[in-house]
Image: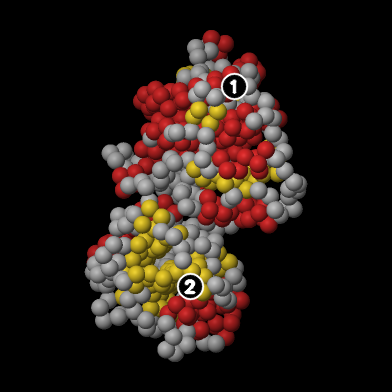
Amino acid sequence: MCGIVAYVGDKEAAPILLEGLKRLEYRGYDSAGIALLDSNDELTIIKRAGKIVELEGAILDEAPTGSCGIAHTRWATHGAPNQTNAHPHFSGTCDIALVHNGIIENAGALRTMLTGVGYTFLSETDTEAVVHLIDHLWEEGEPLEHAVAAALGEVEGAYGIAVVSSRDPNKIVVARNGSPLLVGVGRNGEMLAGSDATAVIAETREVVYLDDGDYAVLTAEGYRTYHLRDGEVERSIHQVTWDLSTIEKGGYDHFMLKEIFEQPNSLRDVMRGRLLEEEGDVRLGGIADHGETLSEIRRIVITACGTSWHAGLEAEYMMEELARIPVDVEYASEFRYRNPVLEDGTLLLAISQSGETADTLAALREAKNRGAPTMGVVNAVGSTIARDTDFGIYLHAGPEIGVASTKAFTSQIVALAMFTLHMGRRRNLSALQGREFVQALKALPDQVEHLLEMNDAIRALAEEYHEASNFLYLGRGFQFPVALEGALKLKEVSYIHAEGYPAAEMKHGPIALIDAEMPVVCLAPRDPVFQKVVSNVEEVKARGGRIIAVVSDAAPELRGKVDHLITVPQTIPALQPVLTTVPLQLLAYHIALLRGTNVDQPRNLAKSVTVE
Ligand code: G6P
C-alpha cells in the first residue's frame, strides 16, 4: 500500500508534492511525510501521524523550501501509524532520505547486520533498514544511484522507493520491484515520479511505467532508466488519456457517490465499440489475437481479491451457464500458497481494478510459472497485472478513487459478460441468443441511469436502518455474489457487521441470528430461482426479521411479506446483478453518511493493497 510522489525541477516542490499526495491518499492515510532539498543542499524532513492535512499544516508552519523532494502517504504494515514510523526515513546525519511502498522481507536480518556495524534504528519499520543499507554501501565519490542499486541487490521483498540525498543533490533515484512506480516526464525542466498517474497528472500526461527490477535517475534535465541486472534500458513513454476532472469530486460530496453516479457512463465506456449487434457477438481488441489459445481453453481459474473476487464469482455463474466452461474462483491469497492443479487447457484469469493488488499479482505469477496462459480484466491502464498477463480486457472505467469499489464492479461484470458471450458464441450459443444478450448489454447504461433516480428513496430507507448493528444479505444464483458485495459495501463504509449468504444456505446457521433487530436484504428479481427466494423470504418473516426486498417487477408474491420493496429494471438473469448492485451501493453510502464515517477513506482500508 502507501503512495509515493517525487519532484525535481525549478518550482517549489512542496505544493506539487502535497497535491500529488492528496491524489494518492486513497492508497493509505495513517501518516504522511515529505523530504526537501533546499538550494544549500540541506535536507529537511517533515512528517506527521494522521491524514495529509496534518502534514499540510506542518508544512505551512515550517515553510520549507526546495525544488527537489520526495513524499509519502502511509498505510501501516510494520509498526504503529505514528510520526516516528512515518516516511521518509533517513540515515546518518539526515543526509539520505527514502520513502517506500511494499514490504522488505529480509528487514530483520538487515537490521541485525546494520546494528552490528553501528547504525541506530529510530523506527519499527522494515523501510529504515534500506536507507541505512544505502548509506552503508555508498562508496566515496560514487553517485547516489550506485549506492541505491548496490543496496537493492541485497534487499528481498517488494518495493517502490524514492531516494534523495544532500551528498548528491538535485537528483532523485526511484526503483520498483513488486510495488507500482512510474516516472512522469515533465515538459520544461522538471521530472516527477509517482505510485500511479494520478500523482503526476497535474504536471504531465507523459508517463514511463517501470518494470520490476528497474530503477531510474531523475534530474531537472531528464531521466535515465536502468535494470538492476541489465544496466541501462529503454522504457517507452505512454500518454495518459483521462484528465484531471475524472479524479476530482465534480460537485459531489464524496468520490463514492460520484462514482456510483458515473456508472451509466462507465458502462457505456466498457462496451464502446465492442458490441456487434448483427452478429450477436463482441469485438474485444485485447483478446482478438489470441483466438487459438482461447479455443483450447477447457477450464478457467479466476483469481482476485475483495470486490473483484465477487465479480469473479459472477463470471463463474455466467461462464458455466452460457459458455459451458468449468470455472473455479480462487481468493488470490489462498491460491498462491496452495499447490494448485493447472492442467493443460486451463486459463488463469486475474481480475483487478487497480492492477496492482499484491496477492492477485502473486497468484498470476504462480500460474505463469506453471505455464498457464493468463488473462487480465483490469481497470488501471499500464498497471502491473495488465502488463504481466498474456492478454486481457480493460474496463476503461476511469480512475476509481473511493476506497470502496463501485463503478469498477459493474464494469467488471459487463467485461466478463462480454467475454462469456465471446466464448459462448464459439461454443454453444446461437446467433439469436447472442443478439438477445447484446441487446440486454446495450440497454444497461440507460437502465442504471433510470434506477439512480431512486437515490432519495434509498436515503429514506437508510434513515430507518442506519442504527442497526447487523445486516444479512441473501441471494441465490446470479444474485448470491450480489449479496456478498452488498454486505461488503456496507461493512467497508459504515462499519456495520454484515454477512452475505446464499438465500437457502441461511437455514444452516445464520437463521439463528434473525430477530426483529436484524434487517435482511433479500435479492429477489424475477429470474428462474425467484419462487425459491420467495420461500426463503417466508422463512425470514416467520422469525420476525425486517425484510428489504430488491425486485424487478411488482412481485405480488412478496406483498405483505416484506417491509420494503426496491424495484429495479428487469434484464436477463446474467446481467441482473448490475442492476441489483446499484441500490445496495447507495444504501451502504447513505447509511455510512448517517453514521458519520469517512465514506471515501474508511478506517483501516486502502484502495490498492500492494502488500501481502
Ligand atoms: C482492496 C480494496 C477493495 C478491492 C480490493 C481488490 O481491498 O479496498 O475495494 O476490491 O482491494 O482490489 P483490486 O484493485 O485488485 O480490484
Identify which amino acid the numbered label 2 is placed on. Glu
Considering every residue shown, the one lying at the far bottom of the view is 140
Q: Is residue 39 left or right of residue 607?
A: left
Q: Is residue 157 above or below residue 207?
A: below
Question: CB of mark 1 within 8 Å of CB of mark 2?
Answer: no
Residue under numbered circle 1: 431
Mark 1 CB within 8 Å of ligand 1: no
Crowding at mark 2 (Cα within 10 Å: few <14, some 14-19, many 20+):
some
Asked whether the viewer can see residue 533, the reply is no
Residue under numbered circle 2: 232
Question: Mark 1 or mark 2: which comes first in sequence?
Answer: 2
Occupied quadrant, residue 421: top right
Depth order, front residue of 5/239: 239
Occupied quadrant, residue 600: top left
* Residue at (55, 44) in percent of width and height: 392
Q: CA distance from mark 1 to mark 2?
A: 52 Å
Q: Is residue 249 above or below residue 385?
A: above
